[in-house]
Image (cartoon, grey):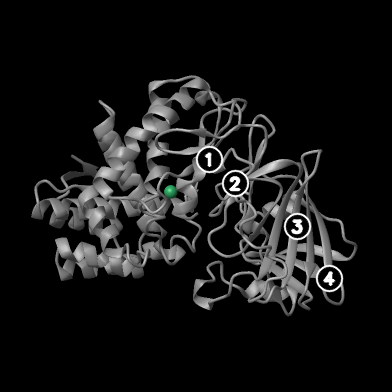
Amino acid sequence: MKRKILLGMAGALISLAAPAVAKPAMYPVATARVDFDATLTRQKDGSWVLDYRFRRKAPAWFFLRSFPKLDGTSWRLDSWTVETPGVKLERQGNYDVLAAGKGMLQRVRIRIRPYGQSLKADYTPYLLFSDGGVAVYDAHYGLVPLKAAADAAALPSDLNDLKIENPRGTLAIANPGGTLLYKGMTTPGQARGDFEGAGAYAYSGPARPIETAAFAGILDPGLPAWIRTELNDFTPRLFALYRDRLGPNASGRPMALVAWGGADMPGQSYGGSVLEGTVVMRISGTKTADSSPAGLSRLRWFIGHESAHFWMGQTVSYERRADAWITEGTADVLAIRALQQLVPGYDARGELQREVDDCIKNNGPGLPLSGASARGDMRTNYACGATLLLAAEAAARKRDPNADAFTWIRGLIDANRADGKVNQADWLAAFAAVSDPALTAKVRDYLDKGVDDPAAFLASLFETTGVAFTRKDGRLILA
Ligand SMILES: [Zn+2]
């Protein structure tokens, strides 16, 4: 989302007269070739109907974004019904594929029951609000043509190296008789998008957008009062700290979509993600219904982690999924360090200990950290990214007693603001600047090849950089 839109959002969010149609109609597109047109229409009964019209001849198309549900199976196969006779929706390797029984695909109609749970490494397809509102993520409908459906089975989960182009199609999202809040603007009836950029949520529902000093957006009316209070009061303090220590973020004042999933399920569930100026949160569970010290701490950590992504993740973003350890590890440590400053009595040591323990447990002998995303091992990105950052923080403090994680991360962000990307080489360069070439080479090996004894490697890394710890029964105990 562009800064311009965000700054103008206060009015645009609630104004039907906003320049929603300022963008020329996308169809037909004059410059780029369009392979397909998609229309996603909200139905009165809560389902959605997806219509494709293909302009390019192909017997099969695969969904570029096909990350599965948390249990590893396809959310599309779970919640989509193809209504066009002869057309199949199937899973081929890492991808969902639409395939013609014979000949070429021309028009396809699919009925969708909105899937509102988290995916393994992608945005929740439908964010369901307790008052009937729903936000749909637009990028899940982009297709790429194939010569044969089975060809998708050979494709790796990370396509970055294959340089596959963005889907060349248009998408219309329709909410007949209602409005849509999409890319910072409220539009009546229908909004148009494409498959360029990172994608965005389109909200339709009865809730009115609200504004706070830190964000504007939709807060589910069903959210427990204490969560609303925290979002309203704690978030501005947190953003002030991040801005002070990390400089401006690329999004200005972000948009928040916060859905309440109810208190029926046991425990507490916080799901979140950040994309182009928007933070999306899903909160549910019995334990979240009422405020408790543990719940408050968990919620604040969650807000801290997701908000940190507006700097590490948005202001600079990774180039390859293999580098997700940089953004997730940073968001974890920034949240912990921020809470340490903002919340009296917060147990930062306990949180950091959990990261070190999980890193050693998950990223075992011979496993390269940069392979964690491809292995589907997301927890490792958070835990080991945070553990490496602890070492960088300590190394920075050796040089400058006033330095902390914010100081080092700000240096990493500032060095990469120009191109907006941060990769492994950038991280290692910033690490080398506060340590030395030999140690940097060891960290590179840990990232690229893995090490025989991860606990011994981290112990020696901590010793050299100055992270205070003791060893006990093979565990590294932070001091
Ligand atoms: Zn994150």
> What residue type is disc 3 on?
Thr
Q: Compare residues 197 and 140 and report the one nearer the observer.
A: 197
In space, the residues marked 3 and 4 are separated at their CA atoms by: 14 Å
Asked where in the image residue 83 lies, by quadrant, the reply is bottom right
Question: Which disc number belongs to residue 11?
Answer: 1
Question: Which disc number belongs to residue 106?
Answer: 4
In the image, 358: left or right of 443? right
> What residue type is disc 1 on?
Gly
Residue that badge 2 annotates: 18
Structural crowding at the residue carrying mark 1, measured as other residues with C-alpha within 10 Å and reported as few (<14), some (14–19) or many (≥20): some
Q: Compare residues 229 and 379 and report the one nearer the observer.
A: 229
Do the numbered discs 2 and 1 sit on residues whose CB atoms are within 8 Å? yes
Task: Give the mark toward the camera: 2 or 4.
Answer: 2
In space, the residues marked 2 and 1 are separated at their CA atoms by: 8 Å
Judged from the image, the secondary structure of the residue bearing numbered disc 2 is: loop
Question: Which disc number belongs to residue 116?
Answer: none
In the image, 212: left or right of 29? left
State the image coordinates of residue 31 (x, y, percent, origin top left).
63, 76
In the image, 4: left or right of 124? left
What residue do we see at 14% from left, 67% from top?
436
Which numbered disc, 2 or 4, marks the residue that appears first in the sequence?
Answer: 2
In space, the residues marked 2 and 3 are separated at their CA atoms by: 23 Å
Q: Is residue 19 above or below residue 283?
A: below
Do the numbered discs 2 and 3 sit on residues whose CB atoms are within 8 Å? no
Judged from the image, the secondary structure of the residue bearing numbered disc 1 is: helix
Which numbered disc, 1 or 4, marks the residue that appears first in the sequence?
Answer: 1
